[in-house]
Amino acid sequence: MFFDTQYTLYVALPVLALTLLVQLFLKATYAKYSQIGTQRGLTGAETARRILDEGGVHGVAVEMVRGFLSDHYDPRHHVLRLSPDNYNGQSIAAIGVAAHEAGHALQHAQAYAPLKLRNMAVPAASIGSSMGYVVLVMGWIMQSFNLAVVGLGLLLLVLIFELINLPVEFDASRRALQILPRSGILTVEENRGAQKVLAAAALTYVAAMIATLWTILFWAMRLGLLGGRRHDES
């Protein structure tokens, strides 16, 4: 297994710490508001269905999917999937998450440009996430500057995707937080709780983007692309 002391100290450990802190914050925030019910008493599934219907989005199924916070909207199959706790739950957290995913369905129905761009970027980002670091490390070990740069370029595809994804996620939450009190699903006070849950969830995307950017900057410096000498010239 590849081991690099500088990478471990300056990238791997800080990124791990950041990821763990954000995940702990999300879980704590979600746990808090999953224990608080709403006056209206709708489930997450009912909330999603109501938002879709009121938004004129028909033909989108709302289904349950296994896993913890595995909630997502699948634009290819027009399916909004909610984890069991959010599908059946009547808590502020469940309502907030369900409304966020319904926000993605509204984006899709309205041909929201950043969402279309994100969906187009998915294949390239998938290749970058699965191959980028492997190619980069192979280039470093083999002392092949060109191969390492290719790996760095693949990681850059991931970063571009994550940058595109941020406004998509923020917009879905914005839509949810506007619809919930307006439609009477949540009171103004309950909506503040939903806002905290969605803000905590958004931090996971920000943390992922920071981690990718930090990794790219570290290797760009080691390869001499941001100053200093190339590793094969030392």
Image (cartoon, helix red, strand yellow):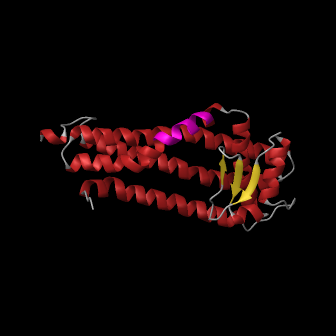
Q: Which residue lies furthest to the left in this view?
A: 234
Q: Which of 111 and 195 is in front in this view?
A: 111
Is any part of residue 124 visible from this angle? yes
At horizontal 54% and vertical 49% (from top left) the residue drawn is: 205
The span shown in magenta is: 116-124
Q: Which of 179 and 162 is in front in this view?
A: 162
Q: Position of residue 82 (x, y in %)?
A: 70, 58
Is any part of residue 188 visible from this angle? no
Q: Residue furthest front?
A: 77
Q: Position of residue 91 (x, y in %)?
A: 77, 63
Picture quadrant of residue 173 = top right
Q: In this view, does 35 lie to the left or right of 220?
A: right
At horizontal 36% and vertical 43% (from top left) the residue drawn is: 216
Q: How many labels does the image show?
A: 0
Q: Is residue 21 left or right of residue 49?
A: left
Picture quadrant of residue 139 = top left
Q: In this view, does 18 lie to the left or right of 102?
A: left
At horizontal 48% and vertical 62% (from top left) the residue drawn is: 20
Q: Nearer the viewer, residue 85 or 61?
A: 61
- Vertical placement of residue 14 versus 151, above or below: below
Q: Position of residue 111 (x, y in %)?
A: 69, 32
Quadrant holding the N terminus: bottom left
